[in-house]
Amino acid sequence: MPETVLLYWHDAVMTHDTGEGVFDAPPSDLLVEQTPHPENALRIANMKRVLEKGPAAKLLDWQSGRLASDQEILRFHSPAYLEDLEAANVNGRAFSRTTRMAAGGLTAIRAAAGTAIAAIESVLDGRTRKAHALVRPPGHHAAPAMVDGYCFLNNTALAAETAIARGMKRIAILDWDVHHGNGTQTGFYGRDDVLTISLHMDHGSWGPSHPETGGTEEQGAGKGKGYNVNIPFPMGAGDFAYRHAMERIAIPRIRAFKPDLLIVANGQDANQYDPNGRACLSVKGFYDLAVMARALSEELCGGKLLSVQEGGYHPAYCAFCASATLEGFAGVPLQTPDPIGFLPEDQDRARATVEEIARRLGA
């Protein structure tokens, strides 16, 4: 049966100013005109517009988010790290070549985290079984004490920690953003109460802020051994490879874990046209992933599912992918049109790729 999804939103997320330059790098005097940083407000504004006016609109009940408190942030992040963010908020700071906070930007960052927390609270309180936090900046690269990859506070991890603080015993986080969810991995790497599964392109480490490789060998440590699962795809993986990896690897791991709650780190940068990823998913590919996640939540968690917006940097196509994803979570047939998507798939190659990843994982 179709199900209403509570969609959480806070206007402050639009105020995070990432500036202009060479894609996500600093400006160049050689250009006629600088380009907007890919993690900009337009990408979320377009998602909001399509969700308000498009086929998914009738499935959504819009709710107000809020700012995260210090106490909530410190469930995952360290006190010294929060102090560093507060200091950067005064005058702004470039934390790396790609990731910068403008003066006053911490309000938007707290709004993203607090809105994700408000969304999970609605599930925990029984007001809904399905909720989505439409937020920016994204969060899954932010480790307990490290800014990385446009991310400052780990919105998904903070939602998980809120659920644990409220009595949930076992949380599964399924991350299909095109980049490795390294901050989430690091924060839960030694724990057995949170299963983290990341499907991503095989980009490896990208420096001191992201030393994790996202490889299959990173499976957790201590009592967390086996509770971190990385599924690194070659470029151009496509819809079939993602579906097969879900069926062959991710779903069996989640079933074996038997979570109380499923959280999806829901990025759309694995799409066919994204400038920040090369996984080549279509609108229907995202719908299929959401249908699978919904079915898992129904089977294992009494239908309890939280979706948190992560990446997605094609300012138009991502909005249609996001709409299709919400339709999948709501349990209705796909209605969102795919305005431009088409790439033929080599299913035999995709199947062989997933089988090799499964072999490396011992699945």
Image (tube, grey):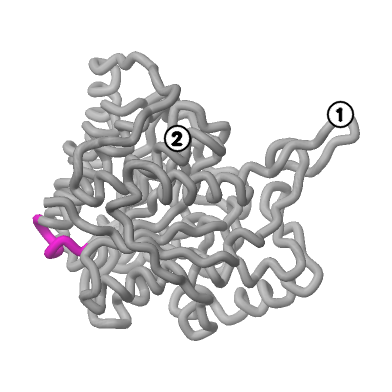
Identify which residue, 51 or 225, lies in the foreground.
Answer: 51
315 is higher (above) or lower (below) than 295: above
Disc 1 is placed on an element classified as loop
What residue type is disc 1 on? Val
**First in sequence: mark 2 vs mark 1:** 1
Answer with the quarter of the image where residue 305 lies: bottom left
Does residue 216 appear anywhere in the picture?
no
User: For this rendering, which residue is in front, 257 or 70?
Assistant: 70
Q: Nearer the viewer, residue 315 or 98?
A: 315
Looking at the rendering, the stretch of residues picked out in magenta corresponds to 299-304
Q: Residue at x 29, y 25 (%)?
A: 353
Q: Secondary structure at mark 2?
A: loop
- Indicate the position of residue 78 as horizontal and vertical percent values: 54, 77
Which image quarter is the C terminus in? top left
Residue 123: tell me if it is visible: yes
Q: Main secondary structure of the magenta part?
A: loop
Quarter holding residue 3: bottom left
Q: Are marks 2 and 1 in contact (CB under 8 Å)?
A: no
Report the amino acid beneath label 2.
Asp
Which residue sits at x=28%, y=35%? 335
Q: Nearer the viewer, residue 62 or 208?
A: 62
Within 10 Å of disc 1 (Cα), the crowding (few <14, some 14-19, many 20+) is few
Point out the residue furthest to the right here.
29
- Image vertical order of residue 180 relative to residue 84, above or below: above
Kindly identify which residue carries mark 1. 32
Residue receiving disc 2: 202
The image shows residue 253 at horizontal and vertical percentages of 18, 50
Q: Does residue 14 sit above or below 358 in this rendering?
A: below
Picture residue at 18% right of the left edge, 68% below the top: 260
Q: Pinpoint residue 267: horizontal percent, then vertical percent.
A: 43, 46
